[in-house]
Each structure stands twice: as C-alpha cells, then as structure tokens.
C-alpha cells in the first residue's frame, strides 16, 4: 500500500490543511492500494499563492524559452527510465491493461513531451508585421497562473498534456488530478522537480469536484485547462465565461470508424478494435461507432463480433490481458445500464453484454458488440466509456458521412478504404477535430481537440502552447526605422 501524508505545494511536500484522505482502490482486487491527503480550499489558496509568486516575482516567465524546454527533455528521459514503475502504478490505480498501458499511458507521455521539445527551434514568441506608420512587434506573453484539472483515464498523459505547454509558455500551474488517480501524480511531481522545474511553478492537489470548482474560479488564476466529461466541461466553461477567463476544454467523444466498401475487412477490423477498446474502452478518442455499408454489413459485424469475443479479459497487471476492469463500481453500473438501454431500444448484442463469469472480483464488463444499431439510439449517441462497440449500417457514402456527423460530439474518427486518397476526401467532410485514414494514432505535433460538445480550443503543437499565451502588439517608433 502506497501512503502519502503530504501535498506537493510550491515545490515542497507540506502538511495538508485538512484531515481528509482519499483511498485509491485497485479496480481488479477491489482493495485499497493507496491513500493520499484530500486537498481543501485552504490548500488551493496556498498553491495558487505559490504559483502567483513564482510567476510574478521570479525570472521564470522571462527566461529564454530554450531553458524551459530543456526541463521537458529531462522529464521525458526520467519518465522513460521509470516506465515499468509508472505503468504498474497506473494499472493499480485505474485498471489499464499493462500491455497497452506501457505504450498508451507512459510511452505516449514521453512522446507528448518530445513533440513539445521539438518546438524549440520553431516556436517564435515575437514576429514583426507591417503597421500603419512602421513596424509592429507581435509578441506572445504567458497568461500567468494556470488551473489544470484532469481525469483518471490517462492520468500521467493528461498531466503532461497540461504542464508541458504551460512550461514552454512560462506559466505556473496548479494541477488537480482525479481522486481515482493521485498516486502517479506524486511521481510526476518528483520527476518535474528533478528535471529542474523551479519551486512554485507546479503544485499538485488531489481532490474531488468541489475543490476543483474552487480552483478554477479562484480570483488569482489567469487560465483554466480542463479534460473530462462534457457535463463538467460545460459547468467549468460557464464559470470561466462569467469571469471572462480563458479556458481550454477537452471533453467526451463518440467517434465513428467508417469502413468504406472497398476496405479489406480482415485487416481493418483488428485495427478498429484497438482503437475502440483501448484502455478498456475508457478513451475519449475511442472509435465506438463502426459504420459499415448494408452490402457488407453482415461481414463486418461478424468479423467485429468474432474478434471482440476473442479478447482476453483478466488481471490488468498481466501483460497478455487485453481487457481489464473499469475504473470504479459506479462506472461498471453506468456501462451496464447503457447496455440494458441498447437492448431496450432494439439493438442486438452479438457478444458480451454482461459481467464476465470468469472474474470473481473486479469491476469488469464483458467486451460487447451491438448489431442492428440505429444511430439515433442512446448507445450510438452517448459516450459509454467502456468496452462497448456499435456496428451501424449505411446506404452509401453520403449516408455514412451524414451518420458520422449526426453526433453531439466531434473529437476523433477514422476512414478505412483501399483508396487512401479517396478516404482522405471523406475525412475532410467529417465535423471532427482529428481524423485518421487507414490507421489509428494520435499525432502529437498536430492540434488536438474537439468540435461541438467535444470541447473548446486545442492542445498539442504550437497551437497547444498558444493556448497559454496572451498576444500583444507593440507598434514601434515610426521615426526609428
Ligand atoms: P469528470 O468530468 O467527472 O472529471 C474530470 C476531472 O474534473 C476530475 O478531476 C474531477 O474531479 C474534476 N471535476 C469534475 N467536475 C468538476 C467541476 N465542476 N469543476 C472542477 N473540476 C471538476 O470526468 P471523468 O469521468 O473523470 O473522465 C472521463 C471523461 O473525460 C470522459 O467523458 C472522457 O471522454 C473525457 N476525456 C476527454 C479527453 C479529451 O482530451 N478530449 C481525454 C480524456 C478523457
């Protein structure tokens, strides 16, 4: 059992203001695996004051950008060096299968850091344009103190997604991990400190949503960045709107994998499965609506059903496991409730649909496939966040595009075809923030974010750093030229 009795505030491990604690429960054993202090509003005040002071009174924000980027390069190397430890820790916290987690949870975090490090030579904070009477310097300046709130599904990855661009910009950060996954955040704090992050630039406060609300509305915060559910994102966006506070929101998804008629089903289905079931289906970019033409519907449904039925369900710490437990009992009940809803609305379960008999403990849901799904059904419209795929028929390509776009979300997607150029034309017609042709991956140098209810703003690439910057125009002395 891992126990922390202090909070990481302003570069020190300090005694918490309150006496509350958070138990981390291993979703496979259902046993307590860790305990940390639960941060309170008083701890938020202290952390925000430390971030304020580091931003306002030290040289952090005005250092050459290259110096800050070097810290990220060292952090990437340190995460790589602790890859197995971090993978194991995250699996214990939230049940991610370790065989996927080593890539999806940890290596991907270093890839995000490396992509931001790669901006060192190209990201310009000043450029000169033509003004009315002379040159205008267009300058980017760090926004200031950042409140960052992250979910439990990819906790280290999300911490990096927030902290790396904020560090490049010269901001300071108070990070609130989800109460399910505070343990890896302590390792992250250690890594960032050893990488050379000055005191005060990062504080980490494990807590629930009330303390999260207090943090994002704190009067001394300048910028909010949030990843999580659309419901919480809307609340946070409204609170930031009332304060005229810049906010980035990375929210839910219900992405479509469009299988065009010329696709090779046998080679495409395993890739779609990886993209639909990764992390036990707890991924915002999961490809959970599989669109197949009526002409090839049975073939696609059969292939998906057969492949999903063959998934290995079990102990997520076993590297051969493909599907582990969901993060929490409430999440299992939610997913089972949506499966029942699918049945009630007339969809047909072709495999799975319940709790696996093979598992005596753990918050498991069987990997499940629904056939005969109409896109208007709840299971096709709502994000399930579990190992549940829907196979939806379309008439022709125009119908496929219409179905893909008939969603409150627009985060990710994919198009599968023997003709990659044609698939790219289809991809251009989907209202979504990112989309893949004939493969599935996140491009860490390209902007990532959502259309519609999937969010506001972008992370990654230069756009990701811009989200932590104000823009200032300085019109120079016209006589000086
Ligand atoms: P959640 O919204 O319940 O919680 C996310 C985080 O926000 C937690 O730290 C929580 O304590 C905090 N929080 C909740 N309400 C808050 C409020 N009103 N004010 C401040 N903080 C608040 O989401 P979850 O169930 O933990 O995570 C799953 C969701 O996250 C899914 O919808 C998933 O799609 C989404 N997600 C999106 C992305 C993306 O990049 N678009 C990435 C990962 C996860």
Image (tube, helix red, strand yellow):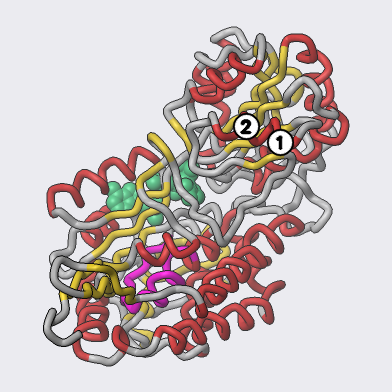
Image quadrant where one finds the N terminus: bottom right
- Whether residue 100 is situated above or below residue 251 in the rendered picture: below
Asked if one can make out residue 262 in the rendered structure from this viewpoint, the answer is yes
The answer to whether 284 appears left or right of 86 in the picture is: left
Estimate the spatial distance between the alpha carbons at disc 2 and disc 1, rounded to whole Å: 7 Å
The correct choice, above or below, for 74 with respect to 213 in the image is below
Q: Are circles 2 and 1 on residues that touch, CB within 8 Å?
A: yes
Which numbered circle lies on residue 425?
2
Nearest the viewer among 25 and 387 is 387
Q: Position of residue 249 (x, y in %)?
A: 36, 49
Query: Residue 421: which numbered mark, if any?
Result: 1
Residue sitting at x 33%, y 80%: 9
**Residue at image x 62%, y 67%?**
111
| 356, 209: nearer the viewer | 209
424 relative to 333 in the view: left or right: right
Mark 2, residues whose alpha carbon is within 10 Å: few (<14), some, or many (≥20)?
Answer: few
**Is 172 contained in the magenta span?**
yes
Label 1 environment density (alpha carbons within 10 Å; few <14, some 14–19, many ≥20): few
Q: Residue at x 54, y 29 (%)?
A: 429
> Magenta includes 92?
no
Secondary structure found at label 1: helix
Observer-nearest of 269 and 328: 269
Judge by depth and name the residue closer to the eye, 378 or 392. Answer: 392
Q: Which residues are magenta?
A: 161-177
């Amino acid at each position: 059992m891992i126990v922390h009795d202090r909070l990481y505030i302003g570069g020190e491990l300090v005694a918490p203001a309150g006496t509350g604690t958070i138990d981390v429960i291993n979703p496979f054993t259902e046993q307590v695996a860790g305990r940390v202090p639960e941060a309170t509003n008083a701890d938020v005040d202290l952390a925000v004051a430390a971030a304020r002071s580091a931003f306002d009174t030290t040289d952090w924000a005005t250092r050459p950008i290259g110096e800050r980027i070097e810290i990220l390069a060292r952090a990437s190397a340190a995460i790589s060096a602790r890859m197995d430890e971090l993978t194991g820790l995250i699996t214990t916290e939230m049940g991610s299968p370790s065989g996927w987690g080593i890539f999806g949870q940890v290596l991907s975090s270093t890839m995000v850091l490396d992509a931001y490090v790669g901006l060192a030579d190209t990201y310009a904070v000043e450029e000169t344009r033509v003004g009315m009477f002379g040159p205008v310097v267009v300058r980017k300046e760090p926004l200031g103190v950042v409140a960052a709130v992250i979910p439990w599904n990819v906790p280290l990855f999300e911490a990096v997604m927030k902290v790396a661009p904020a560090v490049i910009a010269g901001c300071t950060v108070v990070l609130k991990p989800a109460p399910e996954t505070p343990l890896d955040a302590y390792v992250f704090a250690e890594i960032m400190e050893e990488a050379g992050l000055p005191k005060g630039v990062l504080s980490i406060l494990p807590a629930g949503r009330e303390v999260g609300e207090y943090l994002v509305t704190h009067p001394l915060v300048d910028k909010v960045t949030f990843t999580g559910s659309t419901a919480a994102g809307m609340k946070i966006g409204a609170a930031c709107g009332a304060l005229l506070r810049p906010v980035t929101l990375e929210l839910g998804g219900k992405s479509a994998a469009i299988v065009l008629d010329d696709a090779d089903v046998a080679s495409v289905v395993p890739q779609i499965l990886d993209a639909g079931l990764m992390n036990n289906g707890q991924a915002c970019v999961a490809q959970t609506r599989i669109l197949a033409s009526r002409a090839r519907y049975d073939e696609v449904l059969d292939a998906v059903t057969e492949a999903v039925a063959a998934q290995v369900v079990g102990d997520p710490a076993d590297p051969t496991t493909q599907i582990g437990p969901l993060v929490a009992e409430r999440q299992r009940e939610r997913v089972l409730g949506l499966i029942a809803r699918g049945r009630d609305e007339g969809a047909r379960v072709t495999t799975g649909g319940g709790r696996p008999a093979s598992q005596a403990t753990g918050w498991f849901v069987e990997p499940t496939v629904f056939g005969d799904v109409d896109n208007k059904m709840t299971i096709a419209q709502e994000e399930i966040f579990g190992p549940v795929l829907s196979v939806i028929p379309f008439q022709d390509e125009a119908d496929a595009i219409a179905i893909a776009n008939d969603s409150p979300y627009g985060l990710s997607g994919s198009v599968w075809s023997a003709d990659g150029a044609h698939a790219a034309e289809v991809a251009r017609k989907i209202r979504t923030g990112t989309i893949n042709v004939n493969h599935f991956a996140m491009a860490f140098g390209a902007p990532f974010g959502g259309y519609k209810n999937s969010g506001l703003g972008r992370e990654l690439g230069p756009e990701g750093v811009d989200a932590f910057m104000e823009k200032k125009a300085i019109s120079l002395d016209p006589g000086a030229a």
